[in-house]
Structure formats: structure tokens, C-alpha cells
Amino acid sequence: MSVPARGGDNTVRMAGAPAHADPVIECRGLSVFRGQDPLVTGVEIGFGRNEVTAIVGAPGAGKTALLKALNRMMDLDAEIRIVGRVLLDGEDVRAPGTDVLALRARVVLVPARPSAFRQSLFDNVAYGPRIHGRARDRTELEQHVRDGLEAAGLFNEVRDRLTGSCDGLTPEQLHRLCIARAVALDPQVLLLEDPCRGLDPPAAARIEDLVHGLAKRCSVILTVQSMQMAGRVAGRIAFLHAGRLIEVNEADELLTTPRHRLTEAYVTGRIA
Amino acid sequence: MSRLRRSTDTSGSRQRRDRTARVLARGGAWLLLLLLALPLLDLLRRASGGLEWALFLRPDSIEAGAAGIRGALQASLLALVPVILVATPLGLAVAVYLEEIAARRGVAALVDGSVRHLATLPPVVFGLLGFGGLVVVLGLPVGTPLLAGAVLGLAMLPRVVLAGQFALRQVPAFVRETGYAMGASPLQVVTSHVLPRAAPAMVGASFSMLARALGEAAPLLLVGFAAFAVGRPQAMTEPGIPLPVVVYQWGGLPDPLFAARAAAAGLVLVVAVMLLGVAGEWLARRGRAT
Amino acid sequence: MSRAASVNRAAPPALLLAMLLLAPAADAARSHPVIAGSSTIFPFAAAVAERAPGPGALILPMGSGAGIAWFCEGLGAQTPDIVMASRAMTPEEASACRVAGASPLERVQIGWDGIVLAAHADGALPGLTLADLWRALAQRVPDPAGGTEWVANPYRSWHEIRPELPDLPIRVLGPPATSGTRDAFAALAIRPACEAALHGHPRADGERRHCGELRRDGAWVDAGENDDGLIARLGADPASLGVVGFGALVRNAGRVGAVCLDGSCPDADTIRAGGYPLARPLYLYLKPAHRAFVPSLDAFVAGFFAAQATAEGGRLARLGLVPAPADAARQPHAADAGAVTGAGWRNIRGWIAGGVLLAVVVALAAGMALVRRPVPASRLLEKAMGTVLWSSAVVSGALLAVVLATLVVPTLNFFLQVSPVEFLGGRHWSPESAIRASQVVGEGAFGVLPVLLGSVMVAFIALAFALPLACAAAVHGHAWAGLRFRRGWRVGMRLAALIPAVVYGLFAALTAGPAIAATAAALGLGAAAESTLAAGIVVGIMLLPVLAVRIEDALAAIPAAAAEAALGLGATRWEALRDIVLPAARPAIGAAVLLAVSRALGETVVVLMAVGLVANWTLDPLASTTTVTAQMVALMSGTHELDNVRTQLPFVLGLFLAIIILPPNAWALRILRRSNVTPSPVY
């Protein structure tokens, strides 16, 4: 554990506790570039099993790039170049010959803007299990769908309209549907990009509760702008600034006693 | 073997299908480009026998050896004058009125609806409209750039209105709200807030529209331009056959030298149209950037 | 800035604009000659006019009949000064001239022409007799099986007419009913043999009415007004014959030869001496009253008699004119002078035009000047500007309404004479019909279905060809291509969509059509050089860029988040596209396709250059066909009085096309609006 550099110097150096006893995902020297511009620089971090980890930072800090590098969604953009390693259960996800699709089925990403596929509710949730051939028959598929919907706390609300379209869903239900779609794959890690964006406070609070509860099933990594929300949902918080990881620590500790000057400034709202 | 590398059968075949789709799509894109290039390459090949400097200096002739496009070029440029001076500003003014000022009912709604549908009519129909309205009723002189410009302007008018409306719709609502918040009148909001923002798109679309008008032959064939004009027009009311019609006429003649001339004139037409089109794209982009 | 200053600023451009536009419209007089009529005389007139002094002439080859009809609409700048006539005016036409006040006229015989039956240079047809020609081309002939009744012409092959003749299909391309050559051909070649055969026939009176009518079952093809264009079509179809003027034969020596008739072959001597059976005089009729504003009329006429030009090897001789001696040529015609009417009416029209234009221009100039800079919050100014903008909307609306009325009126007149049931349900399209009462052309057949079928087939082939490619390209751009490629690609496609149709028309006529015909022939399939397939494919190529851009727009309108969500679940790009993006974009893609279909249906120049002029009720893509738009152009006669079925027809077709195209377009626009796609109106 490195010595915290409180106040004083302006250098950006990792603070907190990057190492994790048994990380489900571990980044080693991970850098992401778009063309020549660095989006994420030299990140070293481990994400704990069955834990909620929040990546916090101002817009443009590189949160999303880091999150999407974890299941190689960044590869889809031809201009992106990635250096360093991402280990899933100790295996390099970027090793040649890796089955990217299987990787993404294990480490599922839910993008920030919720969107329903133009299909029935059932087919929306069944999409993941279907494309990955998880269900041998209809009963199994229904099991996956029900499982996903229940985990997202949506099943009781929509059980009567599973074959209907998604048009009438409230924004909160849409968020839940997207999470249900991901959970139906029974992923090892769930990546949530800014999961409460655009929701009114009560709905956001309910989604926060949901995310908190999901940690029982899988590891959750989410990006969020607000330190307060991170404190409510996450067990651990990683603070990102200008593409660099500034500090990682237990949520309570990071919020109450930030070790780095920038973290402190962000926690107290002096930089945004 | 590790868990990640053990690619399942389904996943392998899915990746293969993805690659196939990608290869097909890319192949389609290249084939499309190739097919688009084909007529132009053919034009270049044929034009080599008919392209000479004198082509630009001589007016049309019934003898292929003496035929040139000077008169046709002049007629085409003169025909753009009414499009530039009347159809374009009129169309844009209508767009401003419909989009920014009029309530969507009564006359405005009627004009709005008819413009939108007229814009999808093929240009050739406007040739008939031009003949009935401009030649027979208004008595514009046949075979002159004035008539050509009026017909082309008529054909382009609904499209210009539509293009203007689209440009205005791209201007975000907050721009107007900012203006109104300061107590500006609707017209002040339009002139000092909305129009400066919409202008690049409007100008760009107008240039593209000019390029289309320059290359359009179909409506002109219906209003008496399938004819021969001696010399070159010095004014809007002197006989002149616009370039695309001349290309069309030469292309239908049996003399192979005329075919070569047609190709050369077609090449000139393509270059002129592209110049206008590129200018339009450039202006629209430059406006967006600033 | 004061109000006065802004008005002052507006004044000069407004004045300039008004002068620029109104000077010509208010004073409709012109000083250049306008010469219309026979396409046989057209090349000679053009050659003469090229060398004539004075302002450049406008020469319109529209056919003697149509030319005379326009010429006889009255005096004044809106009518031609000279009509080229490859036959003498009929008494009926002369009296029309008189009634409209266009008389007195002067008639000048500029030379002789022989109507030539042209065959491809390698053609195998030996000489014919006029009787052969009559049997081959008349609408009604004696029953070959015997009996006194005459029947609709049953002959398919020249061989059936006379056993010595080769077994070639009877197909003759000739000019339409607006042409003097057609009238003269019917009068000189068909009518005499018919009359002779009817001599002593019991039912002669009933049949005589039809003497001179040409077949309307496809053996006679109305191939347009232009002799040289007809020769070009002949080159593509060596088995056919063409009815053209002698000049076309001379100009295209080497490409085509003449079939000798009644043992006499056409050349300058047989035509002038009268040995060739189809020789006829060529005339110019001119309005002396027009000398007042077109000073160069006489110089133009004199050009036909310049010794240098008419001598052996001279310009006119090389073009194939058989000159008439100058001294005997000129004579006054229809000497009784009528009152000059019509001119006043035309002046009023000029004034109306001027008034409308002035209103528009002043309104605009004022509007532009006001719009230019921020205006002070003056109520008056506000109101003025509002009025300007409002009136431009009303003016545009009124303009469009007036011109729409010009479509509807001739159409209504047409349907007073032709039943809508025949038009919409008939399968026979043979629209040539008399443009004046005494003309023997026979009843036209106005079943639009085969023409519509041609249009639909061209559009179908174009879409079938273009859609997969455009989809593939759009999908590539949307899903796989990099951002920079995509941006360049879109600009490129937008620019490519501006390439004029006439360029594609050239490609179709000169390269694609013959290439496809040759390929089909190599595969053992019979294909016309002007096949539907060639036209469809070239129209398809033309649609590619627009379609690609529109489909890409449709894909881009689907929120990227949907595809991203699928990718996040481990879908491949293709799966995300297939399962998520394409289904969501399907309505907008459908709308783009609908717009492309209507664009293909309305495409004119390409099909005009690539397809034929005969309506065929066939689904064979290798056969030649015609389209609604091609017929519109081919049938447009150019006469201003739309008083008979033949001249109203283009307007009927235009309205028909508009009615077919508008509903699907309206539907497509609605779908696009609902899908948040704004289709660029440029294309």
C-alpha cells in the first residue's frame, strides 16, 4: 500500500489500495488511446468479487473508456488502441484467440442510455440467452427471462404483458429492463455505465437499491459522476481524473478521509 | 485450456457469420463505387475523341466537326440566373415564413402541405406545368434562357422551400428562447438569432439545388428546348439551348463524332455540376465549423 | 439604423432585379427568327441559319403538322415567323391561319425531298412495289384468304406478302402523326394503292375512309420526330426499315441504304425529275407581318438559294437537299388578308406576367434588404416584413395552384373524348391520332397499361439491382467503416447523387444497352438494344448514391444505444444489426425505397435515351418497351392550342404519373417524419 500524498504536491500518483486479495477483474498498466489522445493512462486496479465498485470522475475523466475496456467493447472502435492487461480470473482478456463474445457474456455491459429493442418484452430479456445458445428449449429460456426480470425487480410489474411491446414502460422500468436483459445471461461481472442517468430522485434511489442488491449475484462495476451516489451504492470507490486513477479505497474511507488532494477536492465539490 | 479461449461452437460460427457479413457489406460498398465510376469512366473514354479546346469556343452546329458548346454553356449559366435571383430567395423566404412565423393552419398549412408533396414530384412533370403556365399563359419566349430558368426555378422551388425548412429545423429551440427571453419580436428572433445559425445549411442546400438545376434536362424537353439555337445567347431572351439538352440531343445522333462530342460535353457538365456541389458542401461545412 | 435608410438600401437591388426580369417579360417582342416545323427541312434550315446574318435563330423540329398548327395560332412574337413544311398546307390549315389572323402568308419552295425507305446498310430487302408497301403497312387490307371483306392487316413477314421477298419481320420505324413526312408517306405510298384496290369494290365507300391509315399493331413504329435519331435507332435494330427524308439518307450514307420503290431508286435526279414515286416539294411559309420585328427573315430565306450552298458539294447539297430553282420558288399564299387578332390578348398576358413577376421581385428585394440586419423593434417594420413573407408564401402557393390547373384542364378535356375506362384498363397503346379533322390516321388506342408496365418494370429492375448494393454499402458505412471513411463516403455519395441524368443516359444508350444486347445474344437470347433491362440497370446505378445515403440515414436514426446494448450482451456487430438496428430501421428504409421507386418511375432522360417508343405488353426484360415519361416527351407536340386528344395526351400522362407517385410519396414522408429522418429534398 503506497503512502498517501496528502495536499502539497501536484503530481498525480495512485493513492489508496489498488491490490485486492482475490480480484475478479484486474487491470495492469491499462492505457486506452483514441488515435494519439490518451483516454485512460496506466491504470492499476483490482475489482472485488461480489462487490459493487464505483468508478467516479468528472465527465471526460475516462470512466467509460475504462469500463468498456474491461469486456473489450472498446475494440469495436477502430481508432482505439489499448496497452496493458486486463485479467479476468487471472486470464488476459486481450490474449490472442480469446472468444470475445463469450467474454462479453461473462462481463456484460449495460450502456448509459437505456433502450428497449423493438421486440416484445420477453424477447428483449431473452435476447442474451438466445444469441449465446443458453437455452435448449422454451422452458429453459423462460427460466432465464424470469430469472433476469426477478433479479431486476421487474417481473411482478410486467408478468402479464411479457409478449407485448416495450412502448409503455416508464423510464425506471426501462432501466430495470436493461439490467434484466444483462442479468438474464447470469454474468460474472456486470458493467453499468452511469445507471441512474436521467431518472428522478425516487426512481434513482430504487435503482441504487437494485444495484446494491445485485452484488449478491455477481460483481458489479459502475461508472458514476456523483460521489454521493457512489457512496450510497458502492462498497469501493475508484476516483479517476484526466484518465489517471487517483485513488481507490473502501467507500466510507474514501469519502470521509480522502488521501489525495484531488479526491478531497472532488468529494467536497470543489472540482467537478 | 483456459475458460476464455475455449471458444464454443456457436460462438465460432457466429464470429464467422459476422465476418462474412462484413466482407459482403464491404464488397457491396466497393462494387457500388465501381458501378458509379463506370458511367464516368465510359464518359472519359468516349470524350477523348470529342474534347478539344475549340469545343468551348464554338456554338452548336449541325455538323459534328464544327459543333461546340459555347452557346449551350452560356444558355445554361443564364438559365441559372432566375433560379438564383427568384426561385432560391423566394423559396427560402417561404421557408422562413412557414417555419418561423406562420401558425400551422389556413393558407400556411395549405402551402406547407402542397410544397412538401410537390417536392417529391419528378422534374419532368414541372415541364408540363411550365409549358401550360409559363409558355401558354404567361407567354415566355420559347427556347430562351429566361424560359429555361423559369421552368427550372419552378421545378426547384418546392425543394428549396423544403431545404430551407429543414435547415431552420436544425436550429435548436433554445436559440429562439434566448431571443424571446430578451424581449425580441418574432422577426427579430428570426433575423438575428435563427437565420445566422441556419444560413450555412441553407446556402449549402441552395448550391446543391443549383447543381441539380444545371444538370436537369427532362422538364426542358417538354417546353420546346428539343431544338437548335444558332449562335450564343447574349441576353435572357435570345435563343439558347442549355448544356444538358445539347448533350441529350447529340447523344441521339447517328454520327459517331457527335457521340464523342456528347461525351465531351457531358464531361464538362459533370465538372460544372461537381464544382457547384463541392462549393455547397464546403460552404455548409465551413458555416457549421464557425 | 433608421427606417428610411433601410428602405433606401432596399431600393437599388429591387430596381435592378425588376429591370432584369421585367424588361423581357413586359416587352415580349423579339428580334431573332423562330422557325418551326418539318424535321426533314430542319438540318437545311439549321445549316442556313448558322451562316445567316443577324441574331441567332431558334429552329424547332416538331413536325410539319404541329409546326403549322402553332404557326397558325396567330401573329406576334409568341408564334413562329416561318414554318418548315414538307407538304403543302391543307385548305383546313390555311383557313385556321386566316381565322387566327396569321394570313397573308408567303410560300417558298426551297427544294425537293423523296421519302426514303431506309434499311440498315447490311439489309437484305430488295426493291419493293408501292403495292407491297401498302399490303405491309396499311391498317386494313383485302383478306388474303379470299372474300370481299377487308380485314385488319395479318401480315407478319415480308415473305407472306410476296414469296420472292425474304422472310424478315415487318417492322418500319416512322415519324408520328404530327409529322408532314408521315402525312406525305400515307398520301403518296399507301393511299394510291389502296384506292386502286378499292376500284370497283362493292363496299368501297366504307373502306375508303381508312385508306392511308397505318398499322397500329406494332409493325409500324412511331419513332419520333427526328430523322437522324430514327437512323440511330435503325442502327440498333438492323431488321427494321425506317421512313425518313432523302437528306437523312445522304447524311448517313454508309450507315443506311435505300430500298428502291417501283423500280426507281431515290437520288437527286429521280427526285427532281419526278421518277421516284415518293418525291415531294419542301416549303417554307412565312408571315410578312413579322418582318417588322425580325429583320433577318429574308436573309434567312435567301440562304436556301445561295448558289454556293446548293451547288454540287455545297453545304446544303451535302446535307441532302435537292434544290429548287430560285426564280420559280417564291409566291404569295392565301392572299386574302385577315384582321390581326390575338396580338392584343398576348400583350395582356405579357402584362399579367410582368405584374406577377414585379410583385414577387419587389416583395423579395424588400424582404431581403430588411432581413439583412437586425431591425429595430418597430411595429410598422414588423408588420411590413410579415406581409412580405406572407405574400411570398401566397405567391408561391398561387403559382403552384395555377400551374397545377394547367395539368387538370387538358386532362378533363381528354376524358370528355376518351373513356377513363379505356385509358386505365386498356392494354393497347397506340396513341397516334389525328391532330386535325381531315387527317387520316385512324382512331388512337389509349390503353395506358402497357406504358405503365414499362415504367414499373424499369423501376423494379432498377430497385432490384440497386437495393442490395445500397443496403450493403449503407450497412458497411454504419457498422464497420471508420468515422473518417464514413464522413468522406457520405459527402461523396451526396455529390455523386448530383451527376446529371443525361450522363447516365449517354452511358445507357452508347455502352450499356449495346453491351447487354451483345451479352444476351452471346447467351443465345434475343435482346433489343433498347432493352428494359439496360434502362433498369442504368437507372439503378443512378439511384445508388441517393439510396445509400437514405438507408444510412435510416440506420443512423436508430439510437446507437440499442446496438450498444446488444453488443454489451455479447452480440456480434452483424447480430446487433440484424436483430436490433435493421428491424427498428425497417420503416424508414421502406420509405427510402418508396421514394426511390417514385424517382425511378419519374426518371425521364435515362429512359428516353435507353428504352424504345413502342409499348409492349410483355414481362420480358430483354424486349424493348416504353415508359410513361418517355411517352410524355415523345408525344409533346409543342402546339399551344391543346384542342385535340393527341396534344392533350402528355398532360394526361403527367397528371397520371403525379397521381401514381404522390400517395406513396406522402406515405413515405409520413413514415420518415415518424422515424425522425429528414430526407434531403435535393435529390
Image: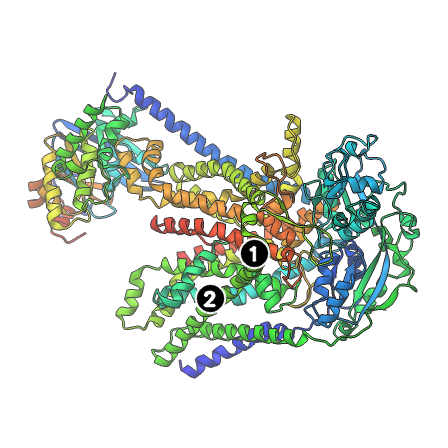
Rendered residue at 45%/38% (across/down): C473
- Using the image, determine if residue C303 lies above or below residue B275: below
Quick check: C496 left or right of C223?
left
As drawn, is B200 to the left or to the right of B210? Answer: left
Image coordinates for residue A13, horizontal then vertical, percent = 19, 41
Disc on res. C397 = 2
- Amino acid identity at mark 2: Gly
Q: Specify the subunit that label 1 lies on.
A: C
Regarding residue C518, the answer to whether it shows in the image is yes
Q: Nearer the viewer, mark 2 or mark 1?
A: 1
The foreground one among A88 and C117 is C117
Type of residue at label 1? Phe
Residue A29 percent location from the top left of the image = 24, 33
Write down the quadrant of residue A94 in the picture: top left
**Alpha carbon distance from label 2 to label 1:** 27 Å
Query: Dot 1 lies on which element?
Result: helix
Quarter of the image where one finds residue A153: top left
Badge 2 sits on which subunit? Answer: C
Q: Does B32 appear above or below B228?
A: above
Q: Closest to the observer: C167 or A87?
A: C167
Q: Identify the residue at the far front of this view.
A: C202
Picture residue at 32% right of the left edge, 59% below the top: B172
Residue A247 lies in what quarter of the image? top left
Q: Which residue is mark 1?
A: C415
Of residues C649 and A14, the one drawn nearer to the viewer in this rendering: C649
User: In the visual, does A152 lie left or right of C507?
Assistant: left
Q: Residues within 10 Å of mark 2 (few under 14, many from 20)?
A: many
Residue B105 position in % (x across, y down) = 35, 65
Q: Quadrant of the N terminus of chain C?
A: bottom left
Secondary structure beneath label 2: helix
- Is residue C372 in view from this perspective? no
- Colour pattern of the rendering: rainbow
